[in-house]
Amino acid sequence: MNCCLKIKLKSFLNFLRSSMILRFLLGTCGMLVGYPLDTIKCWQQASNCRVGTAIYNIIVMNNGLKGFYRGMTFPVLTTGLLNSMLFGIYGNTLRNLQLGVADEKLRKKLQPQHIFIAGSVGGFLQAFVANPIELVKIRLQTRSCTTRGSWECLRNILQIEGFLGLYRGLTPMICRDIFPYGIYMLAYEQILNMLGCLSYVQEKRQQNAAKKLTSVNSNLELTLTTIAGSIAGVLSWIVVIPFDVIKTIMQAEPNPYVYRNMIHCIKVHVERSGWTSLFRGSCMLLVRAVPVNVATFIGYEYYLERCKKTIS
């Protein structure tokens, strides 16, 4: 009995380690592609400028092309943690919601609602961990913080603004994350189900089952994940672009007394730049959503596959 328990525990620990490594690698790959687009987006939002102007300023003020990757240290180091936290909270919340419904038919009927709630809960909780990371990243991307690196920027914020300074822009970030992650998860599951109903997909899945291919090493499943992840990422971002703009403006401002709160920031910004400025960086944001979300959901599917093998 002890021997079997040790084997199971060792297998589970190996699973956790490999899944974290995979999430880190996939998140890093997605970030390497998407981070320059994110830097352009942040410059547009903080300075209320067009794409060409943002690119020019990034290259000139950040000494060349490396400016597109300025502030990437913290996001790279924490991408695995944030993804694991998000999907862990999502999975546990969804399971508890589903187990709380005794009737199987009712449980299936309520599943979309439960997916949305679970995704929203995951987005809400991970915002508290992600906000300081976003703050440092944006300060460095927009040159609001003139320090050389992420750790120095973090120390600078703590010295000037204190611990609460790390949570500047938390309200718009919560607004940006809470419902979109619900839409994100729900759209992903619904799109996958719709694609799975296609006759071509069903035939290919039967062929893959005969070849004993899993969702991880099947080109079909990776393609479906790519399509569903891309669409889900775009749909989830469309509804929250103004909140992302306000979050960037509040976090890029080094003076803690300029904006009292989110409402004050919106009022000041709209009076200064107009309502259309609340949608600055939309193109970059939506384009960036594709590679980042594809990498995230490929890791998600791998995680589920390994989880099933570990449990069995």
Image (cartoon, grey):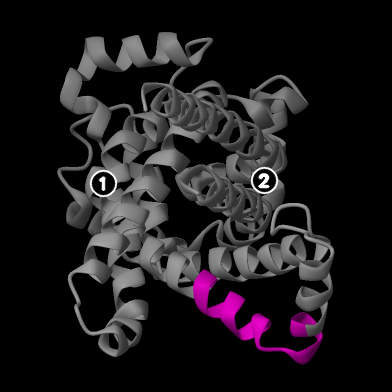
Using the rendered image of the protein, determine whether residue 143 is visible from the camera's viewpoint.
no
Mark 1 falls on what kind of element?
helix
Identify which residue is drawn at 39% across, 28% down.
5
Viewer-side residue, 60 vs 137: 137
Question: Where does residue 32 sit, x and y in percent of width and height?
Answer: 70, 35
- Cβ–Cβ under 8 Å for marks 1 and 2: no
Identify which residue is drawn at 55% across, 63% down.
233
Q: Is residue 200 left or right of residue 77?
A: right
194 up-or-down from 236: above or below: below
The amino acid pointed to by label 1 is Leu
Q: Nearer the viewer, mark 1 or mark 2?
A: 1
Question: Where does residue 113 sit, x and y in percent of width and height?
Answer: 30, 78
Using the rendered image of the protein, determine whether residue 260 is visible from the camera's viewpoint.
yes
- Determine the residue located farthest toward the front in the rendered image: 1
User: Is 158 within the magenta?
Assistant: no
In the rendered image, which quarter is residue 104 located in? bottom left
Q: Is residue 115 left or right of residue 205?
A: left
User: Is 195 within the magenta?
Assistant: yes
Sequence-wise, which precedes: disc 1 or disc 2?
Answer: 2
- Decide whether the magenta segment is chiefly helix, strand or loop: helix
Mark 2 falls on what kind of element?
helix
* Residue placed under numbered mark 1 in the picture: 125
Question: Where does residue 226 sit, x and y in percent of width and height?
Answer: 70, 62
91 up-or-down from 54: above or below: below
Identify which residue is drawn at 26% across, 52% down.
124
The amino acid pointed to by label 2 is Thr
* Residue placed under numbered mark 2 in the picture: 53
Magenta range is 188-202
Q: Which mark is residue 51?
A: none
CA–CA distance between discs 1 and 2? 35 Å
